[in-house]
Each structure stands twice: as C-alpha cells, then as structure tokens.
Amino acid sequence: MILGIDHVGLATADPRAAGAQLAALGLTRTDRGVADGYLVACEFWGLPGDPGGTEIELVSPAGPGSAVDGRLAEQGPGLYHLALTVDDLAQETRVLRDRGLLALDAAPCRGARPGMTVAFMYLPEPAELLLELVHYAPTAARRPPGPRRTRTRPEKGSTPWTS
C-alpha cells in the first residue's frame, strides 16, 4: 500500500548551488548519502519544524556512469522523480506493474539512507513520470514522527512573498 509522498527528486550537476537555492527558501539539509547501485549522491532537504513532511532530494552524479547522467545530458537539471513511501516494496511493485507501470529495477536496491530500500518504476504516457518506491526498515525511520503542519489561509491582501 502507498503510505504517502516521501520526497520529490531534483536532478542537478551542482548540488552546492541547488542547496543554496533551497536554503534561500528556508529549507535545511536533513540527510545525505550515496545510493551505490545507481551511483548517485543524494541530499535531502526539508522545512525546519516539519517532521514527517515531504522532502526535496537533490540527486547528482557520484561517479561516471551515474543513473542521473542521461537525464542531465538530455534535459538538464530539474524535476527528476516522485518518491512514494510503501509498506511492502515487492507487493507494491507487483500491483503497480499489473496496473501498467514499468518496473525499471530487476530487484529492489539499497537507497541513500540507512535502512532505505528503493525500486524505480515508470508511469508511461500521458504522465511520463519516474516513480521511486521507498520502504524504510522499521528501525530506520527517516525522521521522527510528528504532527503534520496545518495550512492556514493567508490574510486578505497578503501574498506568500511578503512577511
């Protein structure tokens, strides 16, 4: 079963500059690691005080032959994938494959975080979206559980760009 959105992946050849842009938005780096099976370096960014919230992952090459090389060469930096947390990686891969998604990995791989296992799938036209299914070992929760932030409607006349 899909439990929620874990993160949104952004491909970049310059994680330092991309991280500075995320910091300017008020996000902080929450974690980083390397997914050896894909040769990608990953930095996870989130809003301070929003435990359990959806994060942004910066994905950059960790060496020649990186899984993100083709994406960067063909399309440049930008939106790379949507990651969904699942309770059973093998079962959800089967379910989604039966629903027409394409499995890109022969078997699940170790993710960029301890206790994180991932499998990539592709949602074909008209969406054409790369999906990452994510499962965390019970002892490897990505962040401490906490209440989700509630969104409030801005006051009349204010904009999200003013404080």
Image (cartoon, helix red, strand yellow):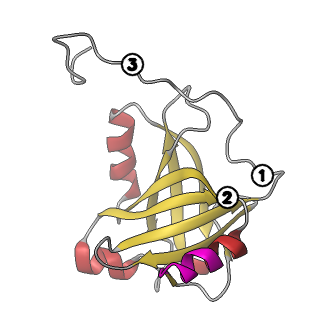
Q: Position of residue 5 (x, y in %)?
A: 53, 51
Q: Amino acid at mark 2?
A: Arg
Q: Which mark is residue 152?
A: 3
Return the residue nearer the eye: 103 or 49. Answer: 103
Marks 2 and 3 sit apart, C-alpha to C-alpha, by: 32 Å
Residue in front for this viewpoint, 152 or 118 = 152
Q: Main secondary structure of the magenta part?
A: helix
In this view of the protein, can residue 134 be seen by the observer? Answer: yes
Say if residue 39 shows up in the picture: no
Q: Position of residue 44 (x, y in %)?
A: 53, 50
Comparing labels 3 and 1, the label whose residue is closer to the camera: 3
Badge 1: how crowded within 10 Å, few (<14), some, or many (20+)? few
Q: Where residue 58 sits in the image (x, y, percent)?
A: 44, 57
- Which class describes the residues within 10 Å of circle 3: few (<14), some (14-19), or many (20+)? few
How many marks are shown on the rendered structure? 3
Q: Which residue is mark 2?
A: 113
Q: Is residue 95 left or right of residue 15?
A: right
Considering only order in the chain, which callout, 1 or 3, is on the residue closer to the N terminus? 1
Residue that numbered label 1 is attached to: 140
Residue at 15% x, 11% y is 157
Q: Viewed as shown, does residue 157 lie left or right of 1?
A: left
